[in-house]
Amino acid sequence: MKQFLKLSMLTFFVTHTGIGQKFNDTLISKNSEINFAKTQKRGIKKNNIVYYVENDLQTISAYKGSKLKWQTNVISICGKPKNGNPEIRYVGYNTDKLLIVMGKHNFAEIDVNNGITKLVG
């Protein structure tokens, strides 16, 4: 009983403190871009950091190992696109920025170091 309690508390700790990994490794690309029209991949791994588009298709999270580094909701910050669904369609990695396409013709940039997000067009 004691061992079960310890295991249950450890499971609770791992899943409720952000220590547990939140993504499936098979959905992570080693390439510098993902286009949701062409692939089922949901994240990009560069420099041991995974930039992952969450299930809502609006939020991008950066994980270093299994620890959340930052998270940003691109649609909330940049606003709903005039054309197309309010969701991320493309993510590209460029040294210090993530380049994002949302809706049909809206573009955003995210600083890979801190998650600061801005609409660029």
Image (cartoon, grey):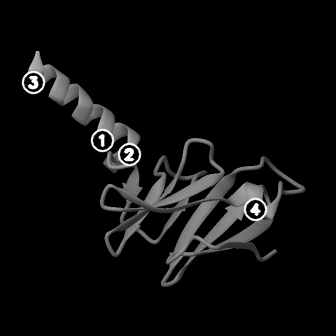
Q: In the rendered structure, which disc, 4 or 1, sits on the residue that comes first in sequence?
A: 1
Q: Residue 17 carries which label?
A: 2
Comparing 87 with 40, the one in front is 87
Real-space Cα distance between discs 4 and 3? Answer: 46 Å
Instruction: Look at the numbered disc 1 and give the secondary structure of its residue.
Output: helix
Instruction: Look at the numbered disc 3 and give the secondary structure of its residue.
Output: helix
Classify 10 Å Cα crowding around label 2: few (below 14), some (14-19), many (20 and above): few
Real-space Cα distance between discs 2 and 4? Answer: 25 Å
- In the rendered view, would you say 115 is above or below 80? below
Do the numbered discs 2 and 1 sit on residues whose CB atoms are within 8 Å? yes
Residue 27: percent from the left, percent from the top?
Answer: 40, 49
Classify 10 Å Cα crowding around label 3: few (below 14), some (14-19), many (20 and above): few
Real-space Cα distance between discs 2 and 3? Answer: 21 Å
Q: Which mark is residue 3?
A: 3
Which residue corresponds to mark 1? Answer: 14
Residue mark closest to the camera, 4 vs 1 = 1
- In the rendered view, would you say 49 is above or below 8? below
Residue 20: percent from the left, percent from the top?
Answer: 32, 45
Which residue corresponds to mark 4? Answer: 77
> Which residue appears farthest toward the front when viewing the image?
2
Comparing 86 with 60, the one in front is 60
Classify 10 Å Cα crowding around label 4: few (below 14), some (14-19), many (20 and above): few
| Residue 62 relative to residue 12: left or right | right
| Residue 11 relative to residue 24: left or right | left
Residue 105: percent from the left, percent from the top?
Answer: 80, 64
